[in-house]
């Protein structure tokens, strides 16, 4: 009998049970990425993004759509995702299915895609999932099972894939790797409000952007 769970309702236990995706001990960003110092201009721009987000967070509610508009779009521009040869495209909400043996996981993504011109969802190398920030009550961890499910689909076409789940303030990067079993590693949390960790956030995004043929899906 085939299971048909909703990707947005999965737990980490579900991910392990249904997709056989196992967690490995976390490593440091430096084990996978070559990071460069930020310029003075980049640091100033980052501070503007921080201050703008904080002003809205103080008002009590920052929706997922506002996180994309206020934080992620400026961060992506700052860290190179808007530059050639990366191509920015907009997609409407589209269905996605992840199938493994007797499991068919379904979900829908409201996607902002940053891809090479002929890229497909299945070959995406970097997924971003946004969860709403309401008085900081909803942690970025909340989106991890759903993010891992989408990233798992990309392992059909490549050996590893990066993912990021965020509520605008807290950022959790994961690296998912194909194998027997497939595994994921959760990297140390970075945070837009904490100055030192916000600098690391921008450095990590820049380094991922420079990966060969980077492609991004923002859910």
Image (spheres, helix red, strand yellow):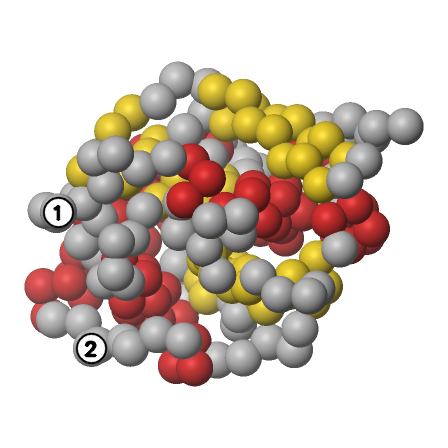
Q: Nearer the viewer, residue 142 or 57?
A: 142
Where's residue 115, x and y in %? 27, 40
Q: Is residue 68 visible?
A: yes
Q: Quadrant of residue 147?
A: top right
Compared across the picture, whether 104 is left or right of 167 comes to right
Neighbourhood count class around disc 2 (C-alpha, 10 Å): few under 14, some 14–19, many 20 upward:
few
Q: Quadrant of the N terminus?
A: top right
Which element type, helix, strand or loop, lies under badge 1?
loop
Q: Is residue 6 left or right of residue 170?
A: right
Name which residue lies at 46% across and 35% down.
219
Give SS at disc 2.
loop
List x then y, in percent, for residue 41.
9, 63
CA neighbours of label 1 inside 10 A, class few (<14), some (14 to 19), many (20+): few
Which of the pair 113/44 is nearer the observer?
113
For the point 50% across and 42% down, which residue is it?
A: 129
In percent of width and height, residue 17 lies at 82, 51
Q: Nearer the viewer, residue 39 or 128?
A: 128
Q: Is residue 49 visible?
A: no
- Checking the image for residue 85, the label placed there is 1
Q: Earlier in the sequence, mark 1 or mark 2?
A: 2
| Residue drawn 83% across the image and 30% down it | 3
Report the residue at 40% width, 70% height from top: 197
Q: Name the residue furthest right.
A: 1
Q: Nearer the viewer, residue 77 or 93?
A: 93
Q: Nearer the viewer, mark 1 or mark 2?
A: 1
Does residue 123 sit above or below 181 in this rendering?
A: above
Find residue 24 and report its horizontal and vertical position in percent.
66, 73
Q: Position of 119 compared to 66: left or right? A: left
Q: Which residue is mark 2?
A: 37
Q: Is residue 87 above or below residue 41?
A: above
Label 1 to label 2, Cα distance in Å? 22 Å
């Amino acid at each position: 009998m085939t299971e048909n769970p909703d990707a947005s309702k999965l737990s980490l236990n579900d991910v392990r049970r249904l997709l056989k995706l196992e967690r490995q001990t976390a490593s440091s960003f430096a084990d996978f990425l070559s990071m460069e110092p930020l310029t003075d201009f980049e640091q100033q721009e980052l501070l503007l993004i921080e201050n703008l987000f904080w002003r809205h967070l103080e008002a009590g509610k920052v929706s997922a759509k506002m996180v994309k508009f206020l934080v992620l779009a400026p961060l992506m521009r700052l860290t190179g995702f808007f530059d050639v040869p990366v191509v920015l495209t907009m997609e409407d909400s589209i269905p996605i299915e992840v199938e493994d043996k007797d499991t068919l996981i379904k979900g829908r993504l409201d996607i902002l895609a940053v891809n090479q011109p002929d890229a497909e969802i299945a070959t995406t190398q970097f997924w971003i999932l946004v969860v709403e920030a309401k008085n900081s009550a909803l942690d970025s961890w909340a989106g991890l099972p759903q993010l891992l499910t989408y990233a798992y689909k990309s392992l059909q076409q490549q050996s590893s894939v990066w993912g990021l789940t965020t509520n605008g303030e807290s950022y959790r990067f994961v690296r998912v790797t194909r194998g027997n079993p497939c595994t994921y590693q959760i990297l140390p949390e970075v945070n837009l409000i904490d100055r030192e960790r916000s600098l690391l956030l921008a450095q990590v995004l820049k380094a991922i952007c420079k990966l060969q043929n980077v492609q991004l899906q923002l859910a």
